């Protein structure tokens, strides 16, 4: 596969928080409700690997703490991400990886929106529509090839 | 007393439930979901709902939509596996797999029987709507492939008595399809929603159509005869805004009590009625008369359908991402 952006700018990352210390309750039967903030959500997605580069989304500045928006009391999370190049064909895949990580990690009470930052992608409206259509996402995740690629991106490297 | 009161929770699925449907007299319920299962619920001698699961080998992916034929002798189920299965009632009143409608290129999103039971419509992410003719019990022939939508088609619904089909799409439009001596054509395109149209439903008399969208609005369309012709055009006569705060996934217009029910990603069930006093010929007004928050815990509600049982018109059936089907009684 040809790498689309051969020499991306690599950013320095913040100190890694020990993720094992952050406890998420995904058991619906349990009534306890632990508040979630944007740093915790950022922590869940910062280690996602870029589909093309041996780097994380944080290292490529594709995701940024300030573009993670959490309203805990309203059960709402939105993440805006920044593709490295405006014709990035990987944008939908990156968005899907972010969504899958959050679907698997956040309590089910959260509604999640994923957006490509406005103006950072030539077809941002189309990418956003697809990423936020639950039926399209559900169907995509039944595609075993695509799921394998997503899972690859979600493997945490040491 | 709560206005929307829970009657019972119907278990059977172990993943998201996409749809739950009554048969034509309210004696059976059929549901389907991400667990690839189809459940058929019926009442036992004590009046308790019990369920049977249809053959789980038939669909290999999510079952997105189910529909009873008007005579209740058949169930059709459409799946992300690109097929639509037909199930026929056998001598033991169980539904048995008899045929598969194949032709769509990818996920089939919706299936619907025409009022006479002689036609079946399906639609898919492949942007097409297919019309099938029922030739015999297990013989279905494709009559027409309609390809005017420019995106994923989310739902198909038939007029309550005429052979008129309506489809709702990711291209933000609704299309009305009619036939002229077996030649199906697009008779009208309804534009107004600014995002995906998830669902549509006619009223009992078939002159009004409700649509719900990812744009979080409900629109009501009315059929006007075009003078001097046999044609008619649909016009938007109401937009209900501000009731839902996430995409609206389903709408049901009761054929028995004329009430409108909607549900969606904001976990709400909303019920509206026509406000006749404040309505005009070309501008209708609707009143919110009941709401239920978190009807399926804090999960999306994917499907809503009013009862088809004339004795119990105020029952409501919902299905959600909490893996449950629920039966509600609405106390007006």
Image (tube, coloured by chain):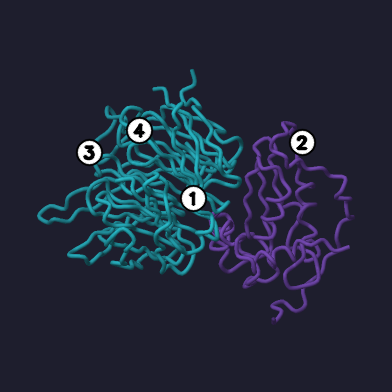
Chain colours: A purple, B cyan
Marks 2 and 3 sit apart, C-alpha to C-alpha, by 52 Å
Q: Is mark 2 on a helix, strand or loop?
A: loop
Closer to the observer: label 1 or label 2? 1
Residue in the picture at 39% in, 49% down: B67
The tag earlier along the polypeptide, 4 or 3, is 4
Which residue in the protein does label 2 denote?
A34
Do circles 4 and 2 both sit on a common chain?
no
Q: As drawn, is A150 to the left or to the right of B285?
A: right
Tell me if label 2 and label 3 are in contact, CB under 8 Å.
no
Which residue in the protein does label 4 denote?
B259
Task: Using the rendered view, name the quadrant where residue B126 is placed.
Answer: bottom left
Instruction: Indicate the quadrant containing the N terminus of chain A: top left, top right, bottom left or bottom right.
Output: bottom right
Task: Using the rendered view, name the quadrant where residue B84 is placed.
Answer: bottom left
Q: As drawn, is A104 to the left or to the right of B173?
A: right
Q: What element carries label 1?
A: loop
Tell me if label 4 and label 1 are in contact, CB under 8 Å.
no
Question: Which of the numbered marks, if any, corresponds to residue B54?
Answer: 1
Marks 1 and 3 sit apart, C-alpha to C-alpha, by 47 Å
Which residue in the protein does label 3 denote?
B281
Residue in the picture at 50% in, 53% down: B55
Foreground pick, B302 / A96:
B302
Do circles 1 and 3 both sit on a common chain?
yes
Q: Residues within 10 Å of mark 1 (few under 14, many from 20)?
A: some
Marks 4 and 2 sit apart, C-alpha to C-alpha, by 39 Å
């Amino acid at each position: 596969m040809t790498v689309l952006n051969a020499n991306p700018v690599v950013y320095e990352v913040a100190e890694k928080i020990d993720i094992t210390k952050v406890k998420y309750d995904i058991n619906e039967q349990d009534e306890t409700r632990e508040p979630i903030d944007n740093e915790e959500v950022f922590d869940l997605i910062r280690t996602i690997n870029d589909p093309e580069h041996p780097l994380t989304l944080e290292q490529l500045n594709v995701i940024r703490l300030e573009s993670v928006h959490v309203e805990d009391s309203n059960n709402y999370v939105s993440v805006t991400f920044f593709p490295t190049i405006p014709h990035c064909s990987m944008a939908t895949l990156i968005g899907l990886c972010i969504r899958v990580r959050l679907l698997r990690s956040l309590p089910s009470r959260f509604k999640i929106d994923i957006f490509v930052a406005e103006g950072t992608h030539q077809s941002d409206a189309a990418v956003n529509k697809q990423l936020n259509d639950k039926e399209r996402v559900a169907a995509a995740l039944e595609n075993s090839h695509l799921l394998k690629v997503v899972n690859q991106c979600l493997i945490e490297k040491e | 007393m709560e206005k929307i009161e829970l009657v019972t929770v119907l278990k059977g699925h172990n993943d998201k439930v996409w749809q739950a449907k009554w048969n034509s007299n309210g004696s059976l319920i059929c549901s389907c979901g991400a667990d690839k299962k189809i459940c058929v619920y019926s009442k036992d001698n004590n009046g308790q709902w019990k369920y049977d699961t249809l053959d789980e080998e038939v669909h290999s992916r999510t079952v997105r939509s189910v529909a009873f034929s008007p005579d209740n002798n058949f169930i059709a189920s459409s799946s992300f596996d690109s097929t639509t299965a037909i199930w026929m009632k056998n001598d033991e009143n169980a539904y048995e797999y008899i045929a598969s409608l194949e032709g769509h290129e990818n996920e089939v999103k919706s299936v619907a029987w025409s009022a006479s039971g002689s036609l079946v419509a399906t639609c898919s992410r492949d942007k097409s709507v297919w019309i099938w003719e029922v030739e015999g019990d297990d013989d279905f022939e494709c009559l027409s492939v309609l390809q005017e939508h420019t995106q994923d088609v989310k739902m198909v619904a038939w007029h309550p008595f005429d052979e008129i089909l309506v489809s709702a799409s990711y291209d933000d439009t609704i299309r009305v399809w009619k036939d002229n001596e077996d030649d199906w054509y697009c008779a009208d395109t309804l534009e107004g929603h600014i995002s995906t149209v998830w669902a549509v439903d006619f009223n009992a008399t078939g002159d009004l159509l409700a649509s719900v969208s990812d744009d979080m609005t409900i629109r009501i369309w009315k059929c006007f005869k075009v003078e001097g012709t046999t044609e008619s055009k649909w016009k938007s006569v109401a937009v209900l805004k501000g009731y839902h705060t996430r995409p609206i996934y389903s709408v049901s217009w009761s054929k028995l009590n004329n009430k409108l029910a909607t549900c969606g990603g904001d976990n709400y069930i909303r019920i509206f009625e026509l406000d006749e006093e404040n309505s005009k010929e070309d501008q209708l007004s609707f009143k919110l008369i009941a709401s239920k928050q978190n009807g399926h815990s804090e999960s999306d509600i994917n499907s809503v359908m009013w009862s088809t049982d004339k004795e119990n018109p105020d029952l409501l059936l919902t299905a959600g991402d909490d893996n449950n089907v629920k039966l509600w009684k609405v106390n007006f």
